[in-house]
Image (spheres, coloured by chain):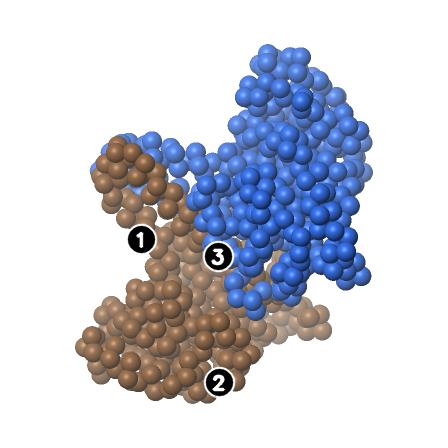
Chain colours: A brown, B blue
Amino acid sequence: MSLPRIAVDAMGGDEGVRVMVSGAALARRRHEQFKFLLVGDEKRIKAALDNHPNMRGSSEILHCDDVVGSDERPTQALRRAKTTSMGLAIDAVKRGDAGAAVSSGNTGALMAMSKLSLRTLPGIDRPALAALLPTLGDHDMIMLDLGANTDCDARNLVQFAIMGAAYSRIVTGQALPRVRLLNIGTEDIKGTDVLQDAAAKLRSATGLTMQFEGFVEADKISRGDVDVVVTDGFSGNIALKAVEGAARFVGDLLKRSFMSSLRSKIGFLISRPATDLLRHHLDPNNHNGAVFLGLNGVVVKSHGSANAVGVANAVAVAARLLEDNLTQRISTDLAELGEERLRETYPSGAAK
Amino acid sequence: MSLPRIAVDAMGGDEGVRVMVSGAALARRRHEQFKFLLVGDEKRIKAALDNHPNMRGSSEILHCDDVVGSDERPTQALRRAKTTSMGLAIDAVKRGDAGAAVSSGNTGALMAMSKLSLRTLPGIDRPALAALLPTLGDHDMIMLDLGANTDCDARNLVQFAIMGAAYSRIVTGQALPRVRLLNIGTEDIKGTDVLQDAAAKLRSATGLTMQFEGFVEADKISRGDVDVVVTDGFSGNIALKAVEGAARFVGDLLKRSFMSSLRSKIGFLISRPATDLLRHHLDPNNHNGAVFLGLNGVVVKSHGSANAVGVANAVAVAARLLEDNLTQRISTDLAELGEERLRETYPSGAAK
């Protein structure tokens, strides 16, 4: 089976064209079947392609002049959906001209454009941004939402749980991923009414393709005993960034400690393979590629500061979701849950 | 000047009496002027005191049979404020029988009891839980609220900023601590209406004893360029625990990496002083002692799982706040802001 090509917004991200094209080329060196639609300034894309002969014959350029600014309001960017590299990459997915879109641009704009163009799956009110995070266990865990929806109601959180579980089944191969809601305590009485409500719905629902195991606190998400952590976009973004910042902080402290004496410096040089392993494990580029779940199509958000390795990983995430047909899986899970049960789980009148 | 004695809820925490009494004794070995009122089961406290001759003559026992459960609902615990060790420790502060209270018990109950018994300072609607966190800079930073208030409005956040700045002045000695609001982006358009509103109020206010510098993302709180991070209790709790969990996660990974080969093991042994330094820097016991700010009295929350070193640090925090008269400082700052300006900053009718 040939994989549909991947539309790459070549203009987004802090580094722009060069990193995006290098990332795509790197992904293609690892997976020769990858094909690309590179969207953006043709002249600059062509210049970047000069360094990557392996992209010849496997990539096409879709020219446009316009770019979404990194600080631009999503509502403003939406008006230029038909002219910007981000908008055209998403549009290619809609038209079936590409299977997935990858962008390192403005997250809010990417979300707004994707939602407007691709629409949400039946049974999903709002898409959510999901990322893979490293754990002490055998595989990564998935956290969502990471910033697409600042405010969420219980119905949103239940849908996020279903989508996250579908994604986790692809990543972990487990039939019933272990799902928890992020909260400030694990006791039943902890947290907001929305969390209480979502937990009650998930506990009482039948036919879910997951094990719902209640609440999890933010200090326990990386232990490897939870596969999907569900939260609203504000808390999820805070948690994700706090984890990233703390990991960097500890790394910096470690560096300082190692440099604090000659003895430690020598020890550092000897144990270099160990610290290199740690660095590799924690490098955000090696976990790059957050996914907008719940759309009629695959859209992957690459970190704005990702390097070529990071972009290549984001491309690989998109390819994997195409291969394993994530969109279809979510639809099936929702259908499995059944119209009847769905209505029990969240009567449409009860939604905010 | 003699320091008022400190009331210790000897029954709270995972380990109970022994750790609380050992912690108080350890604090007293460092600061001989400390005096204690130990509240709880007299027989068990006496047994624990047998190991600490330095506590003789410097501690009195206030006996009670009742203890607040760690999973107990605050509303339920409140009814037993007059009979529990937690309630009686706070009551001692109210009666002037102790200068501060320290407890490792149920945070929600401690908050509810403290608020009911001690009442908030004039100009403060709700107390907030604040903790010191390590940074790469010269001194710790302060984050608040960490879980006392799940929902906050802009007016609450402005008050938290004022209280956090007062605390930071004690810790850092800076006249105008740098204050930021925790958000999911630093651009003006990011975040909830509440955050937008709080930022606008802090930007336009005059007479504040702080430099308000806008928003900060959760990955940048430990870099040492912000002294006070202000947030609602839900996000603050998530951020704090995410940081704690990530630090532990990296530590575990590091251990694994070092054990992955003989060469790394040797390197580890040689650089042991460096990793010990790191461990010491990151041990939560060395940063133990969160403070309820905004009350007529000092109440310090020690972590439920703190060891004797942790409890001793929580006691030292209480002593320092008594010495430096935090409560008075917050009142002065509020008065400094002035009734007029206070009303401009948040007209009382505008509060939720």
Q: Is residue A298 left or right of residue B113?
A: left
Q: Which mark is residue A280?
A: 1
Kind of residue at badge 3 = Leu
Q: Which mark is residue A240?
A: 3
Residue A212: percent from the left, percent from the top?
56, 56
Of circles 2 and 3, the one toward us is: 2
Kind of residue at badge 1 = His
Chain hosting mark 3:
A
Q: Considering depth in this image, is A133 or B171 the residue closer to the camera?
A: B171
Q: Earlier in the sequence, mark 2 or mark 3?
A: 2
Residue A342: percent from the left, percent from the top?
62, 70
Q: Are marks 3 and 1 on the same chain?
A: yes
Task: Answer above or below: position of B207 versus B19.
Answer: below
- Element under disc 3: helix
Q: Quadrant of residue B250?
A: top left
Spatial CA distance of label 1 from label 2 is 38 Å
**Residue visible at 58% across and 55% down?**
B212
Assign the N terminus of chain B to one quadrant of the image: top right
Q: Which mark is residue A80?
A: 2
Residue A80: percent from the left, percent from the top?
48, 85
Q: Quadrant of residue B41?
A: top right
Q: Is residue A98 left or right of residue A47?
A: right
Q: Earlier in the sequence, mark 1 or mark 2?
A: 2
**Residue visible at 35% across and 77% down?**
A10
Q: Earlier in the sequence, mark 3 or mark 1?
A: 3
Assign the C terminus of chain B to one quadrant of the image: bottom right
Q: Are marks 1 and 2 on the same chain?
A: yes
Of circles 1 and 2, the one toward us is: 2
Q: Residues within 10 Å of mark 1 (few under 14, many from 20)?
A: few
Kind of residue at badge 2 = Arg
Chain hosting mark 2:
A
